[in-house]
Image: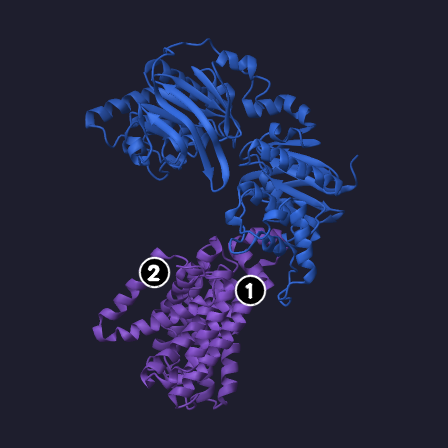
C-alpha cells in the first residue's frame, strides 16, 4: 500500500463523510438500512478500540456495555414512558455504571482474567434478560414505543451524524495527552507507573469513556430499530463481530474500526444470496486480513507511512 | 564531596511466600553519589530496586526519600516524589517520535488536561539535547540503534528532574564505545546533584563509574566499600568464582591439529537492537572438554542457544564440517548437539524414570536399557529416585537428572549451561565427581558454560573467557590461573 500520512487522512475523511452524506440520493432504502446499522456498529468498534488499542485491556464483552445501554433505554421508554432523549442519556449513564461495576473488580486482576470476567458479564446479562422476561421481553425481545424516525433517509443521516461526532471525539481523545498516557499504560503498565502515572485511574477512565459511547450507541440502535433483543445487541455473535470489526480495521487507529464495521456488515448482507455460506466467507476474509495484515486495514496503511 | 542524604534505607526485607528475596538491607545514598548494587542472578538486587520504586511492596523496613518514608507508596506517587528509573527492557511507544516519547514523561497525571502545555515541548527538546538525541528527536524509535533507545529511556527517567535515579543494568547490550559514552552521561548526573543507584551483575563493569559498591548474595549484604575493596573481598570472590582458582595439569588428550567438531566462527547475535554476542570464535575438537567462563549476562546462554539453533545469528556455526545454517533446532538436537539448559526444563510432574525414557525415546530397547544402566552408575542417586516426580527432587538432583536426560540422547556434543546455578557447595562436589567420571570413562565432547570458575577449570582441556559479548581470553586452565586469576571479576 502507498504512503498514507495523518494529514492525508483528514482530507480523505472529509471527502468520505461528504460522499456518505449524499448516498441517500442514490441508494435503495434497503442498502441505507444496512449502512445505518453498520454506522452504529462502527461506534461500538471504536469504543472497543479505545479500550483494547490504547489502554491495552482486552474487553471480550463489548456487548455487555452496549446491551446495558440498550435495555436501560428501552425499558425506561416502554415501561416508564420517559422521553426518548432522556432514555438515551439514561442508557449512557447505565452503561457507565454497569461498566464500572464490572471494571473495578476486574481491573485488579492480572493477565487474562480481565478478559474472562468481561466475557462472563455478557452471559450474565443475557441470562438476566431471559429471567426478567416480564419487563425485558425475554428471548423474544421488546418493542419500544418511540423511534428515531420512520424515514430511512433521516435514520441514515442520524446514524451518520452520530458516527462522525463519536469519531471526532474519540479520535481527538486518542491523539491527546490522555491518549498518549493510555498507550504507555497499555504497552507497559509498570513503566507508565514509574513515569508517574496512576495506571488504574487512567484505565478506569478509558473504560468509562468506552462504556459511555457503547451505551449511547446501543440506546440509539434500539430507537432506530424500534426493538431491543438479545440477538441484536447482546449475543456472543454480536460481541465477536464488534471485536473483529475493530481488529480488522486496525488496532490503535480508532477510525479503522469504522472501515472494519462497514466492511463486515456490508459483506454479510451482500453475500446473503449465497445462503448459509455467507457468514463463513466473511469470517474467512476477516481471518485472512488479520493473518496477512495484523495491523488491520487502516493500521497497515498508516504503518507503511511511518516506516518512511 | 557528597551532598545531603537523598535515600535512606533501613531493615529492608521482602519475602515471596517462604523465599526471602531481600533480607535486612540498609544503605544511604547521597546526592552527587553513584553507588553500585551488585550480585549474581537471584541475589535480590533487582528486587531492592523494585522495592524502592514501589513496584513491589516491602515486607518490612523503611525507605526514606529526603526524609519522608515512601515504603509501600504506589509507584506513580514515588515517581512524582522524585525517583526516576531506567528499566533494562523498555517498550517505547513505536507510533510516536522520540520527542513525543520524552514528552510523555512530562505530562501531568491528570484526566482533564487533554492539551499538552506549550512549555512541555520546549522542555522535551532541551532534555533530548541533554542526552544527545537532538538530531534524531523527530524519528521513530524503531528506526534508531539500540544505544539511542537507551538514551531515550534515560531522557524519560530524568525528565521530571528526579533527585534519585535508578539504573537497571545500564550497559547491557551496549558496545564498549557506547558504554564509555553512556558512562559519561551517567557521571554528568553528579553535577546535577542527583543520587544514582546502578544495579549490575558484576563489579568490573561499573568499577570505573561508581563511588561505592554494595554486593548482595541470596538476599543478604555480603560486602560494601569501594569497587577495589569489594573485588578483593573474600566472600565476594567465593560467591562469584567459587573459591580459589585451581587448575590441574593439562591433559593433552586431543591433538591440537585435528579438525574441530564444532566450529563457531564470527558469530554475532542481536536481541532486537541489543548486542548479545559480538563476533565470537570458539572451536571444540572431538573428545575435548571446553569451558566457557563468564559472569551472568556475558552471553554464554546466547552462544549456546545460537549453537542449538534457537536464536538467529550472523556468522557461521559448523558441526562435523557441515554448516548448521538453516537447520532447525530439532534437527540439530537429533544430529548430536544436545543442550542441557540453565533452566533445566525438566518435566516436573513426570517421574525421574519417565524423564529419562523421554530422552532415550529414539534408542532401540536394549540400547536404551544399557544407556540407563550406565547413567545410574554415573548418578547413583537417580537410581534410588526413579519413581519420584522430578519436581520433588532437590536442586542438585534435578541438575543431575537434566544432565542424565541429555546423555540419554547419546550426544556427540553435550552443551552444559551453568549447571551449578543456585546449587550448594556439597552438591557441586558430587556434580564435579560425575563430570570427572564422564570425562574419564567416555569419549564424549563437552562444552560447558560457567560463572563458577572453580567448577569449570578442573575438567577443562581448554578455557575461553567471555566478557560482555566478546571472547577476551583463550588458553589452557593453568595459564588461566596465572593470567586471569585476578582480572576475572
Among the 4 quarters of the image, the one containing residue A138? bottom left
- Residue indicated by mark 1: A175
Q: Is residue B278 left or right of residue A291?
A: right
Q: Position of residue B423 (x, y in %)?
A: 48, 28
Instruction: Identify the chain drawn in blue.
Output: B
Mark 1 is surrounded, within 10 Å at the Cα level, by few (under 14), some (14 to 19) or many (20 or more) other residues, namely few
Instruction: Identify the chain drawn in purple.
Output: A
Mark 2 is surrounded, within 10 Å at the Cα level, by few (under 14), some (14 to 19) or many (20 or more) other residues, namely some
Any mark on residue B166, and which? none
- Residue indicated by mark 2: A289
Among the 4 quarters of the image, the one containing residue A29? bottom left
Q: Is residue B68 left or right of residue A132?
A: right
What secondary structure is found at the residue carrying circle 1? Answer: helix
- Gap between marks 1 and 2, in whole Å? 26 Å
**Relative to B144, residue A306 above or below:** below
Q: Position of residue B328 (x, y in %)?
A: 31, 36
Q: Residue at x 37, y 27 (%)?
A: B403
Q: Residue at x 65, y 41 (%)?
A: B12
Q: Earlier in the sequence, mark 1 or mark 2?
A: 1
Q: Position of residue B234 (x, y in %)?
A: 62, 21
Q: Please name whichever residue, B386 or B139, is drawn nearer the observer in this view of the structure.
A: B139
Q: Is residue B441 visible?
A: yes
- Image marks 1 and 2: residues in contact by CB distance under 8 Å: no
Q: Position of residue B160 (x, y in %)?
A: 68, 52
What secondary structure is found at the residue carrying circle 2? Answer: helix
Amino acid at each position: 500500500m502507498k504512503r498514507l500520512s495523518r494529514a492525508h487522512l483528514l482530507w480523505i475523511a472529509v471527502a468520505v463523510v461528504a460522499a456518505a452524506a449524499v448516498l441517500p440520493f442514490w441508494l435503495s432504502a434497503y442498502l441505507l438500512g444496512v449502512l445505518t446499522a453498520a454506522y452504529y456498529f462502527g461506534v461500538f468498534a471504536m469504543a472497543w478500540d479505545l479500550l483494547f488499542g490504547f489502554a491495552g485491556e482486552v474487553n471480550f464483552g463489548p456487548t455487555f456495555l452496549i446491551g446495558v445501554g440498550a435495555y436501560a433505554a428501552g425499558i425506561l421508554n416502554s415501561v416508564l414512558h420517559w422521553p426518548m432523549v432522556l432514555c438515551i442519556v439514561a442508557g449512557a449513564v447505565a452503561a457507565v455504571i454497569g461498566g464500572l461495576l464490572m471494571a473495578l473488580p476486574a481491573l485488579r486482576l492480572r493477565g487474562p482474567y480481565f478478559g474472562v470476567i468481561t466475557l462472563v458479564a455478557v452471559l450474565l446479562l443475557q441470562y438476566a434478560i431471559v429471567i426478567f422476561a416480564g419487563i425485558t421481553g425475554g428471548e423474544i425481545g421488546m418493542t419500544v414505543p418511540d423511534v428515531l424516525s420512520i424515514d430511512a433517509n433521516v435514520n441514515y443521516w442520524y446514524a451518520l451524524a452520530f458516527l462522525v461526532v463519536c469519531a471526532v471525539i474519540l479520535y481527538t481523545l486518542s491523539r491527546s495527552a490522555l491518549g498518549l498516557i493510555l498507550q504507555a499504560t497499555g504497552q507497559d503498565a509498570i513503566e507508565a507507573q514509574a513515569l508517574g502515572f496512576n495506571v488504574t485511574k487512567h484505565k478506569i477512565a478509558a473504560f468509562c469513556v468506552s462504556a459511555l459511547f457503547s451505551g449511547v450507541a446501543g440506546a440509539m440502535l434500539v430507537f432506530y430499530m424500534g426493538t431491543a433483543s438479545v440477538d441484536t445487541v447482546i449475543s456472543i455473535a454480536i460481541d465477536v463481530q464488534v471485536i473483529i470489526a475493530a481488529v480488522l480495521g486496525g488496532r490503535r487507529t480508532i477510525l479503522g474500526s469504522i472501515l472494519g464495521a462497514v466492511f463486515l456488515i456490508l459483506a454479510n448482507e451482500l453475500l446473503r444470496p449465497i445462503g448459509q455460506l455467507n457468514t463463513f466467507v466473511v469470517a474467512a476474509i476477516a481471518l485472512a486480513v488479520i493473518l496477512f495484515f495484523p495491523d488491520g486495514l487502516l493500521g497497515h496503511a498508516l504503518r507503511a507511512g511511518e516506516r518512511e | 564531596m557528597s551532598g545531603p542524604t537523598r535515600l535512606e534505607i533501613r531493615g529492608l526485607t521482602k519475602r515471596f511466600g517462604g523465599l526471602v528475596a531481600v533480607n535486612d538491607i540498609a544503605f544511604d545514598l547521597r546526592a552527587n553519589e553513584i553507588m553500585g548494587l551488585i550480585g549474581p542472578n537471584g541475589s535480590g538486587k533487582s528486587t531492592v530496586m523494585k522495592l524502592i520504586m514501589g513496584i513491589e511492596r516491602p515486607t518490612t523496613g523503611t525507605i526514606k526519600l529526603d526524609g519522608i518514608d515512601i515504603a509501600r507508596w504506589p509507584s506513580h506517587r514515588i515517581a512524582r516524589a522524585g525517583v526516576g528509573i531506567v528499566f533494562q527492557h523498555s517498550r517505547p511507544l513505536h507510533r510516536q517520535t522520540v520527542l513525543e516519547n520524552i514528552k510523555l514523561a512530562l505530562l501531568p497525571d491528570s484526566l482533564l488536561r487533554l492539551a499538552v502545555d506549550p512549555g512541555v515541548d520546549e522542555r522535551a527538546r532541551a532534555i533530548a539535547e541533554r542526552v544527545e538525541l537532538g538530531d534524531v528527536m523527530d524519528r521513530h524509535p524503531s528506526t534508531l540503534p539500540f544505544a539511542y533507545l537507551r538514551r531515550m529511556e534515560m531522557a524519560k527517567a530524568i525528565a521530571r528532574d528526579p533527585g534519585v535515579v535508578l539504573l537497571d543494568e545500564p550497559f547491557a547490550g551496549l558496545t564498549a564505545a557506547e558504554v564509555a559514552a553512556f558512562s559519561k552521561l551517567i557521571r554528568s548526573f553528579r553535577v546535577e546533584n542527583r543520587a544514582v543507584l546502578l544495579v549490575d551483575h558484576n563489579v568490573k563493569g561499573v568499577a570505573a563509574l561508581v563511588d561505592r559498591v554494595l554486593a548482595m548474595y541470596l538476599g543478604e549484604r555480603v560486602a560494601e566499600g569501594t569497587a577495589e575493596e569489594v573485588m578483593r573481598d573474600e566472600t565476594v570472590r567465593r560467591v562469584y568464582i567459587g573459591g580459589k582458582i585451581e587448575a590441574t595439569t593439562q591433559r593433552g588428550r586431543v591433538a591440537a591439529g585435528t579438525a574441530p567438531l564444532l566450529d563457531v566462527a564470527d558469530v554475532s547475535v542481536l536481541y532486537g537492537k541489543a548486542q548479545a554476542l559480538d563476533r565470537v570464535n570458539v572451536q571444540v575438537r572431538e573428545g575435548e572438554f571446553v569451558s566457557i567462563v563468564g559472569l551472568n549476562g556475558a552471553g554464554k546462554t546466547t552462544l549456546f542457544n545460537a549453537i542449538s539453533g534457537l536464536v538467529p545469528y550472523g556468522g557461521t556455526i559448523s558441526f562435523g564440517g557441515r554448516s548448521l545454517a538453516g537447520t532447525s533446532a530439532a534437527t540439530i538436537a537429533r544430529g548430536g548437539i544436545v543442550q542441557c539448559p540453565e533452566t533445566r526444563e525438566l518435566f516436573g510432574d513426570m517421574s525421574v524414570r519417565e524423564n529419562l525414557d523421554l530422552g532415550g525415546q529414539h534408542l532401540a530397547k536394549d540400547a536404551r536399557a544399557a544407556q540407563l544402566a550406565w547413567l545410574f552408575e554415573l548418578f547413583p542417586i537417580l537410581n534410588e529416585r526413579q519413581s519420584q516426580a522430578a519436581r520433588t527432587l532437590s536442586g542438585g538432583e534435578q541438575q543431575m537428572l537434566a544432565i542424565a536426560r541429555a546423555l540419554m540422547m547419546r550426544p556427540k556434543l553435550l552443551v552444559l549451561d551453568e549447571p551449578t546455578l543456585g546449587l550448594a557447595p556439597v552438591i557441586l562436589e558430587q556434580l564435579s565427581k560425575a563430570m570427572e567420571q564422564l570425562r574419564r570413562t567416555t569419549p564424549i565432547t563437552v562444552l560447558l558454560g560457567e560463572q563458577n570458575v572453580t567448577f569449570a577449570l578442573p575438567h577443562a582441556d581448554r578455557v575461553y573467557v567471555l566478557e560482555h559479548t566478546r571472547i577476551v581470553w583463550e588458553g589452557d586452565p593453568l595459564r588461566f590461573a596465572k593470567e586471569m586469576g585476578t582480572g576475572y571479576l
